[in-house]
Amino acid sequence: MFEPTTRLGRIAILWRGDEAARRSVSPETSRFKAVFAALADVGVDAEPVVYEDDVLDAVRAQLATLDGVLVWVNPIHEGRNRANLDALLREVAARGVWVSAHPDVILKMGTKEVLHRTRMMSWGCDTALYRTLEQMRVELPLRLAAGPRVIKRSRGNGGQGVWKVDALVSPPHPADGSRA
């Protein structure tokens, strides 16, 4: 294993977790242990930061002492959002801490929209983007005529907000089971 002689900086690896996760956190036992090890191999000191909105001030103080932060927070996990975290990340970035991925970059990319923007590249695929409900009402049935489609929300991961949609073979019956 290569052991660098110069340390290149200090970063946080930040993910969402509860009080128990914060109390027991360690690089060696986290789901990111390979990332911690790889960073250490190239001279980057990394420390775990377990985030939740109730510890915002403590996380702010911790991030202020570091050079950067790698963020691994699902934007829609368990019905939560990243509003407070994104505001914090903008704040620490404005103070000179490198933030990956910066919330403004994520918004500009349109997380899932990037799939549509790059659909013509060698690794792209048949992808549609519906900017309005009306556009979806008009275009989706035409696309379903060719077969099932996968519909994704703009943000999220881990399969949340992802649906497989197929055209109905016959019209649905009323909820009471009678035939019209």
Image (cartoon, rainbow, N blue to C red):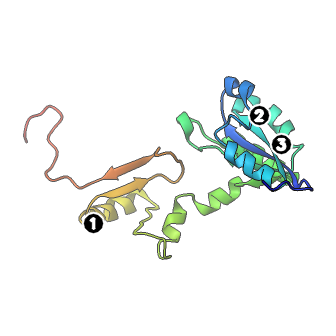
Identity of the residue furthest to the front in this view: 1
Determine crowd level at label 3: few under 14, some 14-19, many 20+ residues with C-alpha closer than 10 A. many
Task: Name the residue: 52% across, 48% down.
Answer: 157
Identity of the residue furthest to the right in this view: 6
Q: Residue flagged by tag 3: what amino acid is it?
A: Leu
Q: Residue beneath label 3, please?
A: 63
Give the CA separation, mark 1 to mark 3.
49 Å
Q: Residue flagged by tag 1: what amino acid is it?
A: Leu
Give above or below for 150 relative to 126.
Answer: above
Could you tell me residue 135's position as x and y percent? Answer: 39, 63
Nearer the camera: disc 1 or disc 3: 3
Determine crowd level at label 2: few under 14, some 14-19, many 20+ residues with C-alpha closer than 10 A. some
Task: Name the residue: 45% across, 46% down.
Answer: 161
Could you tell me residue 14's position as x and y percent? Answer: 72, 42
Say if mark 2 contacts mark 1, CB within 8 Å: no
Residue 142, numbered label:
1
- Sequence-wise, the earlier of marks 1 and 3 is 3
Using residue 171 as the reference point, say whether residue 74 is left or right of it. right
Q: Residue flagged by tag 2: what amino acid is it?
A: Leu
Say if mark 1 contacts mark 3, CB within 8 Å: no
Q: Residue beneath label 2, please?
A: 56
In-front residue for pair 46/152 = 46
Could you tell me residue 123's position as x and y percent? Answer: 49, 71
Determine crowd level at label 1: few under 14, some 14-19, many 20+ residues with C-alpha closer than 10 A. few
Which element carries disc 3, helix, strand or loop? helix
Using residue 97 as the reference point, say whether residue 178 is left or right of it. left
- Sequence-wise, the earlier of marks 3 and 2 is 2
Which element carries disc 1, helix, strand or loop? helix
Give above or below for 117 relative to 159.
Answer: below
Task: Name the residue: 7% across, 39% down.
Answer: 179
Locate the C terminus by quadrant: top left
